[in-house]
Amino acid sequence: MAESTGSYDLRKEFISPVVTGFALQEYVMKQLVATTSTDANKETYWEETAADLTGHSVGSTFKGVPRLANFPYAQVTWTKRSKVNLKHASEAQLSYEDIKTNDIDMVARTLLRIARGVTKSVDTEIWNALTEDQTAVRINSVSIAAGSEWDSTTIANRNPINNILSAIQAIQENNYNPYQDGFLVLSPKDFKNVIDNDKVSRNPTFKTDIVSNGKVGDILGLKIIVSNSVTADYAAVVVAKECGTWRQVAPLEVVTIDDPGIKLTIRAWEYGSCLLTNAKAVCLIDNTQA
């Protein structure tokens, strides 16, 4: 059947790839987690204890087992956790008149904002899951002392290098390797405060290398990414892929609903949730801002 200008079948071939393309450029936090598919409403998973195994009996260690003696008993432990998958969605309606007569390209701008809206929601979900809504219970944490924030009025007190190293240390002490795909996650304001610091700019490991998906450089063996999903006054060091998983019920999907001569509806959604599977592979840094 021949298609007329403005029909749904013509529009959907254009709009769906454009929204998806915009979205792929906007995701920042997704690179921090592994992505696996699911068809469950509720995810149940097991979090493995990070501590090194030791013998359970008092004074029982792995070293120095006598001849013919029983081996020290050790046991890996897990904690059962669960989370419900959620849908992240947005839509917009454009009137026939606005599409035809507005000075602004309404369709192009709406595609961009719809993509940003859904990806921002997903990124914020991942940030909040990995940082336990910025209330460190299972994850590691480093607290910056009052007066030593990264924008402290006392310039000499600012020491982001020390704070980041403390976060790296906390992760290492829990048997994870932050130099194996490690990230420093910053808000735009904290990124400015960090790179403006003399201790950072003079550090031989620091380099700016703006690429994609929020990556803006490297320092202390960590890739730096910047996102507006990061809560003000917080930052984090994360071992990517090991820290958590994005459980994907449905990837980003887009449809258009055309009501000829009246309006065009653009609708986008993604369905899933982020699981914090290895909490000690994350370290939250708090009180970064005065």
Image: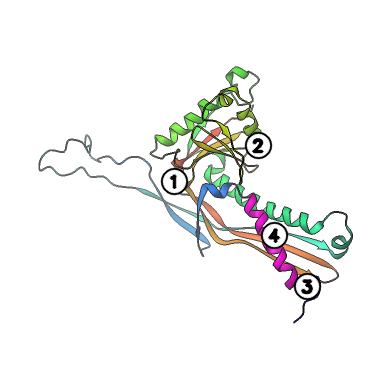
Relative to the observer, which residue lies in front, 184 or 129?
Answer: 184
Q: Secondary structure at mark 4?
A: helix
Relative to the observer, which residue lies in front, 218 or 43?
Answer: 218
Kindly indicate whether the residue at mark 2 contacts the one at mark 1 (C-beta within 8 angstroms).
no
Q: Residue at x 81, y 61 (%)?
A: 94
Query: Mark 1 and mark 3: span between their CA atoms?
Result: 48 Å
Tag nearer the camera, 4 or 1: 4
Kindly indicate whether the residue at mark 3 contacts the one at mark 1 (C-beta within 8 angstroms).
no
Kindly indicate whether the residue at mark 3 contacts the one at mark 2 (C-beta within 8 angstroms).
no
Q: Secondary structure at mark 2?
A: helix
Q: Residue at x 53, y 42 (%)?
A: 131
Disc nearer the start of the sequence (1/2): 2
Residue that numbered label 2 is attached to? 188
In which image quadrant can residue 111 be found?
Answer: bottom right
**Would residue 23 be counted in the magenta stretch?**
yes
Q: Quick check: 256 left or right of 173?
A: right
Residue that numbered label 4 is attached to? 18
Query: Mark 4 and mark 3: span between their CA atoms?
Result: 17 Å
Residue 84 lies, in percent from the top left, at 54, 57
Q: Amino acid at mark 3?
A: Ser
Q: Residues within 10 Å of mark 4 (few under 14, many from 20)?
A: some
**Would residue 41 be counted in the magenta stretch?**
no
Query: Mark 4 and mark 1: span between their CA atoms?
Result: 35 Å
Residue 51 lies, in percent from the top left, at 35, 40
Of the numbered discs in the image, which one, if any, rests on residue 7? 3
Residue interval drawn in magenta: 9-26
Disc nearer the start of the sequence (2/4): 4
Q: Amino acid at mark 2?
A: Pro
Residue that numbered label 1 is attached to? 278
Q: Main secondary structure of the magenta part?
A: helix
